[in-house]
Image (tube, rainbow, N blue to C red):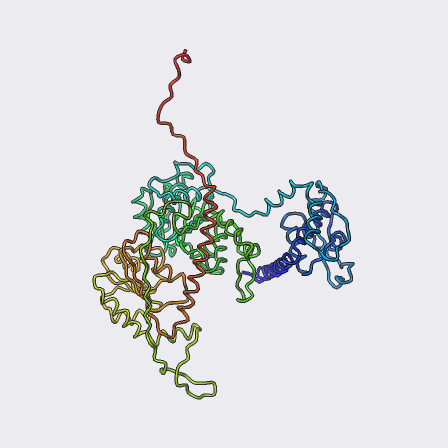
């Protein structure tokens, strides 16, 4: 975010704080002030603060509350800035220059005249109600237009005549609903939880777009997932091809590749793009996010698919919104968010804006935790039990105890929550943690195991104790990584050692029901996605996840648990919005007569 965007967001947040405080003390002020600006704009070519002060019988107790009213009038197309300024005639305001605004509604039919009366000594709600009623009752149409303009929703960019011919046979009802929505929207996001069939849904969407446009569609997937998607395409009867070298298919079908090979492709060759595990967009300033937004800015049809669009921070949804061309993050922040005074640089969703925000999200996305969120049956999508077992390894705090500022040595090490201190603790306890993980793996020799590590030195320590395990690390070539991950998927490899950043997204490993984390990071998304490789819909067995941490890493566990609670609260709000959106769902059935009509004998010549 640029410095200007940050400043504007903070300005808007400050004005909103004042407006909220004013609304609590004088509920009708903003409506009365806005009605005054609207009336003046209809009567004269320019509007200045002096004009409004002379015409408005009320004064706010929080002076910044004026700012939110002026901004509302600008957003609603009532006035616009001219660039001119002048001092106010009011002695209390004469120290500052105030903008002169140009009217955009001069000469339009005006409502009944505002009641002219001196400002009451105590500005009461009944007084406001009388004034606003007199100003607006005769112009109820304008008021309704104003309210409708305040509703924010993504404009559909897809196919208006979606029918049963576009719906791939064999999909579950919730997949059909999401497919129809995405085709109508044209640029949409499918935030379905793991195991709900995002891959089949994305392939069906790409197939429909390819057939409609007679051009190919590009599907981007994480490492080693492209082959899995190709197999799924063959299963459901969708034409798709694996593409490694950037050549677009000659016929209208889906080209599947990895994000690592994106630079080999020309986006202009494709009518649409599918981002599998699109949470890769969540970094506001990340180079990958910027590259994806810029590369596909001209692509007419776009689909994002992930189970974790914003694991514990609502503002991350703005990155998906920007990629889809719906709304840029700064505008989203200024509309629905406010600066979090307890956390510098962070924003929180305004309480009065919760429903409006999620209704806006529902206009371009479907967020589904289970089919019943959309009003469908959960049969076949009941999750098995997940058992998380935490194992605490005692760290020797006398090792590397350090010294005080004065040079006096310490008896015990005092760990902190800083990144440097956490890595120091991990290095000091890697052997103990590796021994505990190896013990757990050997205790169940007939089970397939995923051993998640955070660092290379953790992987080295564990590999020394489990020489029969197969490791996948970042320094390997793309082909070598894919080969080893595919071997684990097929069952040829029983024990896999890797990082969540390498294999934590997109892969379906329901054949495995045992995993061990040799420590955690502060990323809740990494933990959630890693667990979900095995614990997902269509997993038939109980999944056991062992988390092995040193006692000096307790702060990480606390942060991950806190973020898990935030994620659960966000999913509840999502589910409520999706339920409201699903009520207006409809599908146009294609007229496909199967029986010929015969005319009565008296009509045949």
Observer-nearest of 355 and 49: 355
Residue at the spot x=49%, y=57% of the render?
314
397 left or right of 437 in image: right
Measured as percent of width and height from the top left, residue 301 is found at: 45, 45
The vertical placement of 192 against 527, above or below, is above
94 left or right of 396 in image: right
Query: Could you say which quadrant of the image residue 468 lies in?
Result: bottom left
Measured as percent of width and height from the top left, residue 329 is found at: 53, 56
Observer-nearest of 197 and 302: 197
116 left or right of 175 in image: right
Query: Could you say which quadrant of the image residue 166 lies in?
Result: top left
Observer-nearest of 358 and 190: 358
* Location of the C terminus (image quadrant): top left
* Location of the N terminus (image quadrant): bottom right
Residue at the spot x=57%, y=56% of the render?
334
Query: Could you say which quadrant of the image residue 23 lies in?
Result: bottom right
Residue at the spot x=42%, y=80% of the render?
414
Measured as percent of width and height from the top left, residue 590 is found at: 41, 33
The vertical placement of 140 against 224, above or below, is above
Measured as percent of width and height from the top left, residue 179 is found at: 41, 43
């Amino acid at each position: 975010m640029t410095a200007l965007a940050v400043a504007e967001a903070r300005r808007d947040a400050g004005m909103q704080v004042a407006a909220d405080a004013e609304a609590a003390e004088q509920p009708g002020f903003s409506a009365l002030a806005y009605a005054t600006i609207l009336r003046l704009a209809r009567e004269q070519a320019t509007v200045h603060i002096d004009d409004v002060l002379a015409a408005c019988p009320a004064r706010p107790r929080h002076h910044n509350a004026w700012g939110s009213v002026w901004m509302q009038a600008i957003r609603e197309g009532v006035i616009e800035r001219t660039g001119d300024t002048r001092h106010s005639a009011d002695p209390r305001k004469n120290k500052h220059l105030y903008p002169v605004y140009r009217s955009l509604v001069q000469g339009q039919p005006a409502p009944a005249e505002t009641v002219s009366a001196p400002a009451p000594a105590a500005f009461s709600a009944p007084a406001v109600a009388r004034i606003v009623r007199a100003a607006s009752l005769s112009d109820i149409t304008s008021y309704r237009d104003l309210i409708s303009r305040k509703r924010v929703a993504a404009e559909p960019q897809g196919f208006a005549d979606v029918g049963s011919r576009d719906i791939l046979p064999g999909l579950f009802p919730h997949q059909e609903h999401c497919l129809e929505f995405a085709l109508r929207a044209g640029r949409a996001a499918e935030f379905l939880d793991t195991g709900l069939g995002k891959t089949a849904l994305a392939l069906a969407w790409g197939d429909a777009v390819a057939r409609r446009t007679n051009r190919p569609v590009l599907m981007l997937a994480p490492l080693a997932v492209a082959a899995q998607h190709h197999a799924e395409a063959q299963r459901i009867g969708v034409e798709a091809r694996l593409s490694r070298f950037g050549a677009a298919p000659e016929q209208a079908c889906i080209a599947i590749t990895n994000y690592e090979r994106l630079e080999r492709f020309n986006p202009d060759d494709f009518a649409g793009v599918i981002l599998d595990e699109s949470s890769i967009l969540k970094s506001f300033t990340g180079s990958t996010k910027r590259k994806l937004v810029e590369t596909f800015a001209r692509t007419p049809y776009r689909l994002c698919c992930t189970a974790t669009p914003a694991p514990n921070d609502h503002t991350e949804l703005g990155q998906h919104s920007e990629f889809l061309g719906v709304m840029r993050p700064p505008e989203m922040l200024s509309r629905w968010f406010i600066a979090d005074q307890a956390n510098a640089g962070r924003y929180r969703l305004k309480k009065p804006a919760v429903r409006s925000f999620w209704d806006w999200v529902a206009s371009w996305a479907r967020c589904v935790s289970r089919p019943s969120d959309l009003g469908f049956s959960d049969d076949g999508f009941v999750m098995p039990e997940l058992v998380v077992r935490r194992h605490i390894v005692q760290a020797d705090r006398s090792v590397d105890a350090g010294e005080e500022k004065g040079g006096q040595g310490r008896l015990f090490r005092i760990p902190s929550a800083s990144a440097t201190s956490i890595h120091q603790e991990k290095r000091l306890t890697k052997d103990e943690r590796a021994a505990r993980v190896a013990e757990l793996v050997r205790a169940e020799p007939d089970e397939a195991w995923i051993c998640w590590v955070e660092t290379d030195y953790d992987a080295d320590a564990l590999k020394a104790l489990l020489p029969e395990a197969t490791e996948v690390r970042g320094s390997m070539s793309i082909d070598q990584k894919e080969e080893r991950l595919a071997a684990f998927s097929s069952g040829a490899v029983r024990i896999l050692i890797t990082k969540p950043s390498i294999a934590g997204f997109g892969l379906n490993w329901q054949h495995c029901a045992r995993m061990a984390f040799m420590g955690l990071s502060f990323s809740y998304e990494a933990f959630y996605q890693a667990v979900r490789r095995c614990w997902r819909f269509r997993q038939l067995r109980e999944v056991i996840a062992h988390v092995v941490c040193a006692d000096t890493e307790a702060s990480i566990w606390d942060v991950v648990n806190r973020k898990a609670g935030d994620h659960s609260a966000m999913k509840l709000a999502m589910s409520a919005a999706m339920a409201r959106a699903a009520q207006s769902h409809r599908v146009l059935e294609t007229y496909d007569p199967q029986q010929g009509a015969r005319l009565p004998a008296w009509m045949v010549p």
